[in-house]
Image (cartoon, rainbow, N blue to C red):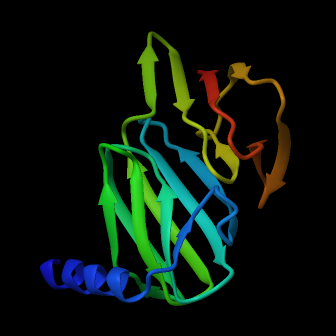
Amino acid sequence: MRAASAILALLLVAWPALVVVGAGGGVSGYCVVRVYPDGSTLFEYKLVVADVPSNVSLRAPRGAIYVGVVAGGEPAPYTYDGERGALYFLALYRDVTVRVYTLEYTSKEGALWELKLEPLDFETLIALPEGALLVSVEPREFTVKLVNGTPLLAFKPGTAVRLVYT
């Protein structure tokens, strides 16, 4: 792990062009947020980086217990700041998948679960546990997409989301 961090630091210095996601930085994509029955949450970003190689700065979920970055089918070096919710990685390939697994975004009171998401830089697609019943959705501006037989709630980039479900 120390060697990967050293390589990432060297590459970050070698390529001064930093792509900041959300600032018109040449990265497009979407994020699928999968909520599991125990309240754990997987954020899976599917990204396309316009110009490679690029150093990418991504606003990411805080408090991750797992982070993985795969570019071109290979693990990519990254640096993750869990307190700030920031992820930095070197994109050597255009197609990048980022996975962040966390326990930070759900809570339960009685039979009701609550999911609260901070704004993400991409379209956000939320998959609740199978059989979950929605009690409330904020904001009300969303669409429903059916992906592989699974209904996903779709929110525009930059939208903070609060869902209550059973």
- Is 129 rendered above or below residue 116? below
Residue 49, compared with residue 61, is above or below; it is below
Residue pictured at 63% horizontal, 51% vertical:
121
Q: Position of residue 104 (x, y in %)?
A: 38, 35
Q: Looking at this rendering, what residue extends furthest in the front direction?
A: 16
Residue name at image x 27 percent, y 86 percent: 10
Look at the image and tell me in which quarter the C terminus lies.
Answer: top right
Q: Residue furthest left?
A: 2
User: From the image, which quarter does the N terminus lie in?
Assistant: bottom left
Vertical arrangement, residue 80 with respect to residue 27, above or below: above
Question: Is residue 30 rendered to the left or right of residue 154?
Answer: left
162 on left or right of 108 = right
Image mark count: 0
**Could you say which is closer to the camera, residue 116 or residue 8?**
8
Residue 131 location, x and y as percent? 65, 34
Q: Is residue 16 left or right of residue 1?
A: right
Residue 112: horizontal and vertical position, in percent?
A: 53, 15
Q: Nearer the viewer, residue 153 or 133?
A: 153
x, y percent for residue 70: 47, 79
Q: Residue at x 63, y 71 (%)?
A: 47
Residue 3 lies, with reference to residue 58, above or below; the image says: below
- Residue drawn 68% across and 25% down? 133
Nearer to the camera, 73 or 35: 73
